[in-house]
Image (cartoon, rainbow, N blue to C red):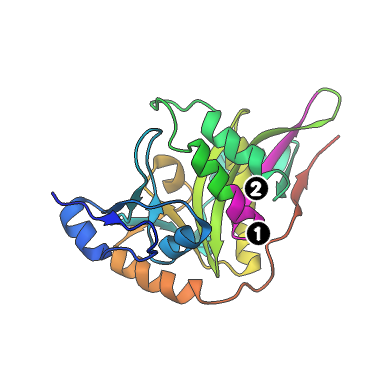
Amino acid sequence: MDIPFLHPKSKTFPDVNQAIAERDGLVAVGGDLSPERLLTAYRQGIFPWFSEGQPVCWWALSPRTVLYPEKIHIGRSLQKTLRNKPYAVTVNQCFPLVIQACAQVPRAGQDGTWITDSMQQAYVRLHEMGHAHSFECWYPDESGRLKLAGGLYGVQIGRVFFGESMFAVQPDASKIAFACAVPYLAQCGVELIDCQQNTHHLARFGSEQIDFADFSATLTRCSALPLAQKIGCGTVAVKHIP
């Protein structure tokens, strides 16, 4: 299997359809994680995914898992939690801490992380440019002081939000963050959330799998549209904080 290598100075990617047909979605290897290359990749439905010590690997998966914000499903148990548990959800309050936690918090069935130091630095740069955003879930401690309990981050281009990773150090924290983030993103004008890969966790929220061609068409349209309002920096939701 011949795998294309990216030229260090070129931001052009090989044909995605060929990558899906012949290499299980592996588009290319190499290049860097510069903001220009990352934004070029995301606009084509390509994302980086590799482990520490490996070259940068670029992927475009089919079928693609997506969530349409208007179709989000909140199960009864989570609805009860959202009504009764004390929490606060914020946006863009501590992006570096969120991506660091996503890299460091242990996950069942996983050894290590794909969110390497270089990945963290690259997405912090995107955040500083206004193209990456974090949502944080805070729980009050015994004294009522809010502490970071979970969250998520992703990339935003136009009316598309590309979800990257989430974490939780307290029960339900990432679920609460996601349940509050999706309506907020919809309010800002986001029409498509790219979940990349199918998981049981996302399926419970109403994610679905679509062919890459359909995903690409929607991505092209939505990424070219401006948001209805800017994704800001502040509080998204507060419930029962003492």
Q: Dividing the picture into quarters, in which one does residue 15 lie?
A: bottom left
The answer to whether mark 2 and mark 1 are in CB contact below 8 A is yes
Residue to which mark 2 is pinned: 135
Sequence-earlier tag: 2 or 1: 2
* Residue toward you, 211 or 176: 211
Label 2 SS: strand
Q: Nearer the viewer, residue 42 or 218?
A: 42
Q: Is residue 209 left or right of residue 94?
A: left
Q: Is residue 51 above or below residue 61?
A: above
In the image, which residues are magenta? Answer: 124-141
Q: Which residue appears at 55% of the width and 61% of the height?
A: 156
| Residue farthest front in this picture | 9
Queried whether the magenta region covers residue 133, the answer comes back as yes
Callout 2 amino acid: Phe
Quadrant of res 11: bottom left
The amino acid type, in three-letter code, at marker 1 is Tyr
Q: From the viewer's perspective, is 213 left or right of 186? A: left
Secondary structure of the residue carrying tag 1 is helix
Q: Which residue is mark 1?
A: 184
Depicted 166 relative to depicted 194: above or below: above
